[in-house]
Amino acid sequence: MTPEDRARVIDALPAALRDVTDEAGFRRDICVLAAWVGQQVLRSYGISARAHAVRAVILNRQMREHVGDDLDRLFEPWTAELEEELDRRGAWSVLLGWEGRQRADRPRTPGRRFPGHVILETRNPDRLIDPTLDQAARPERGMPLEPAALEVPRDQLKRFGRGDGVAAFEDEDSGVLTVYGVVPGLDFRRGADWHDAETRELTGPLRGRLVAQVRGRLDRVLEKAAA
């Protein structure tokens, strides 16, 4: 596979994954399952992808103005007055993979679900792939998020992978800031979602069908580029 085709596969993977899982009727907050399927698809092309358990902070433009460079302000006690002021300004944030306070318009799901968020890392090209980033989308709050393969400078990617730094991405059009940080010791591979993806809920034909359908969409991307 040429470097150009390798990049095409990686960059097209998030949208292909979302299309297939939507058609299969899955929810959008299936980060563990999506990462597992994505990893298998990339492996079928000879591309290695490392999965990371992370926490993510996503801020709209107004919330960025409120917190400035200090993300810890998101986790300070909020008074009724501050809540009212942020609502007036349209400031909003979504946290993925946090057990603490979450300013979002959906309750947490109780039970056996993995208490984190999972993304993939590739090298050459250097990307962080978040196939379920759109679960944090709030278009009405100025946060039109889509599944993404985000380009990361190699030095930043190395620090991120070691847990020594975060990876941050700004969308120039919307002003949305997305920040990822690895969570040491949070092993999604031992969780029910990853285990079920391999042994129970997706055993046999359904598991193979998901991987094959995503692979088929990516093959068409390569065929179109070669035409």
Image: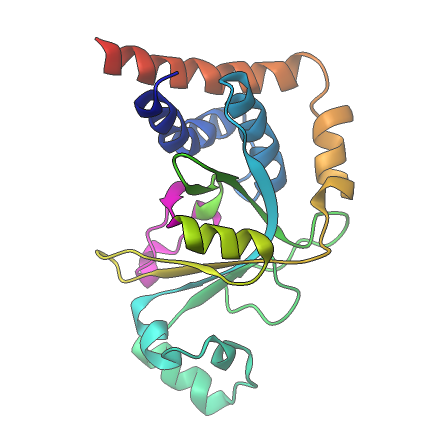
Instruction: State the residue at coordinates (34%, 62%).
Output: 141
Magenta residues span 134-153
Q: Left or right? Give the position of 89 relative to 76.
A: left
Q: With respect to residue 70, does 14 lie above or below?
A: above
Instruction: State the residue at coordinates (56%, 20%).
Output: 210
* Residue 176 visible somewhere in the drawing: yes
Instruction: State the residue at coordinates (25%, 11%).
Output: 226
**Residue 81 spot, x, y in % from top left:** 44, 91
**Residue 115 spot, x, y in % from top left:** 68, 54
Q: Left or right? Give the position of 20 relative to 198.
A: left
**Quarter of the picture holding the C terminus:** top left
**Quarter of the picture holding the N terminus:** top left
Q: Left or right? Give the position of 160 relative to 177.
A: right
Does the stretch in magenta take in 44?
Answer: no
Q: With respect to residue 1, does 79 lie above or below?
A: below
**Residue 153 spot, x, y in % from top left:** 37, 50
The residue lying toward the viewer, choosing from 6 and 79, is 6
